[in-house]
Image (tube, rainbow, N blue to C red):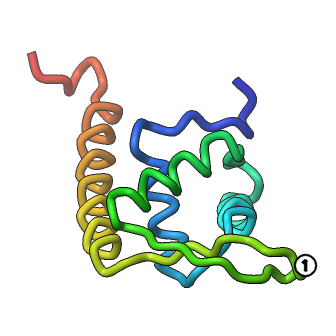
Amino acid sequence: MPTTEVELLQGTLDLLILKTLSLGPRHGAAVVRWLEQVTEGALVVEEGSLYPALHRLERKTWVSSEWGVSELNRRVRFYSLTPEGREQLLAQMEDFRRLVRLVTRVLVQSPTTAPR
């Protein structure tokens, strides 16, 4: 796998979208662009993944949307984080931190330090 490709864990895309929208309303292309910029191009989210995730988050009432005009003067849907979405973001961030700590604990084990 090239170093520029990253496989996301199940549910991680939702977390990344919620985080992006916590910074302010954005349309889909702006969400993708921001994630690419922050990861220096290492994370590319395809439309086929993004829009189903946005619609799923909207059904869960974590995200709301409304029509507006983009910076290119095109009619687009802008997505915003709801109060429920902000709560969910905080919970998912803590869950992800806990997962990273646990995975790190496993990865740092050497044959001489691993429990038997």
Asked where in the image residue 81 lies, by quadrant, the reply is: bottom left
Q: Residue furthest right?
A: 72
Which residue is the site of mark 1? Answer: 72
Q: In this view, does 1 lie above or below 41?
A: above
Q: In this view, does 72 lie above or below 110?
A: below
Q: Residue at x 45, y 66 (%)?
A: 18
Q: Residue furthest left?
A: 116
Dot 1 falls on a residue whose secondary structure is loop
Q: Residue at x 72, y 69 (%)?
A: 30
Q: In this view, does 74 lie above or below 98?
A: below
At label 1, which amino acid type do we have? Answer: Leu
Query: What is the quadrant of the C terminus in the image?
Result: top left
Residues 23 and 6: in front is 23
Callout 1 crowding tier (Cα within 10 Å): few <14, some 14–19, many ≥20: few
Q: In this view, does 31 lie above or below 99?
A: below
Residues 37 and 62: in front is 62
> What is the x, y in percent for residue 95?
24, 54
> What is the x, y in percent for residue 2?
75, 29
Query: What is the quadrant of the N terminus in the image?
Result: top right
> What is the x, y in percent for residue 31?
65, 65
Image mark count:
1
Asked where in the image residue 83 lies, by quadrant, the reply is: bottom left
Residues 6 and 30: in front is 30
Left or right, residue 1 beside residue 52: right
Left or right, residue 95 beside residue 13: left
Left or right, residue 64 beside residue 43: left
